[in-house]
Image (tube, rainbow, N blue to C red):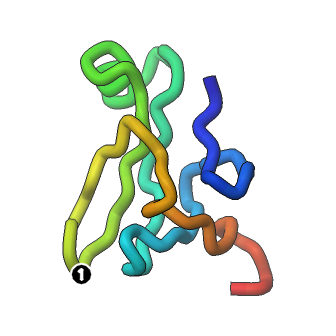
Amino acid sequence: MAFTYQSGEEIRKGDRVLLHGEPGEIQLVAERLTGDPELDWYVTECGGGVMVVEPKAFGRLFLTKIDEDLVFVSRAGDAAT
């Protein structure tokens, strides 16, 4: 199961996003068991999700449901950032 933004883009580690209007970045995407203990814990215990780093208001926030409050801005490494 791939996590996607409301706009349809697949959520990837390093993506720059807005979370409730505040700039942030996707720190990890846990969508299936991988053998990585950190990612596998999120899949096993929470059913998967994405970790967003947003230092101003939330710090780190693990989302298991993606809604309109998480908005894709750009991919890591894109020249148009």
* Residue 35 horizontal side relative to residue 46, left or right: right
Q: Residue at x 73, y 52 (%)?
A: 9
In the picture, the quarter occupied by the C terminus is bottom right
Q: Give residue 50's quadrant in the image.
A: top left
* Residue 41 horizontal side relative to residue 30, left or right: left
Mark 1 neighbour class, 10 Å CA radius: few under 14, some 14 to 19, many 20 or more? few
Q: Residue furthest front?
A: 68
In the picture, the quarter occupied by the N terminus is top right
Where does residue 65 sit, x and y in percent of width and height? Answer: 42, 39
Residue at the disc numbered 1: 56
Where does residue 69 sit, x and y in percent of width and height? Answer: 44, 62
Q: Is residue 18 above or below residue 37?
A: below
Kindly tell me whether residue 76 is visible in this rendering.
yes
* Residue 61 horizontal side relative to residue 21, left or right: left
Q: Residue furthest right?
A: 79
Kindly tell me whether residue 37 is visible in this rendering.
no
Q: Residue at x 65, y 67 (%)?
A: 76
Where does residue 51 sit, x and y in percent of width and height? Answer: 37, 48
Where does residue 66 sit, x and y in percent of width and height? Answer: 47, 45
Q: Is residue 81 above or below residue 49?
A: below
Q: Residue at x 52, y 26 (%)?
A: 31
Q: Nearer the viewer, residue 19 or 12?
A: 19
Q: How many marks?
A: 1
Q: Give residue 62's quadrant in the image.
A: top left
Identify residue type, mark 1: Lys
Q: Nearer the viewer, residue 27 or 5?
A: 5
Mark 1: secondary structure:
loop
Q: Is residue 21 above or below residue 75?
A: below
* Residue 19 horizontal side relative to residue 56, left or right: right
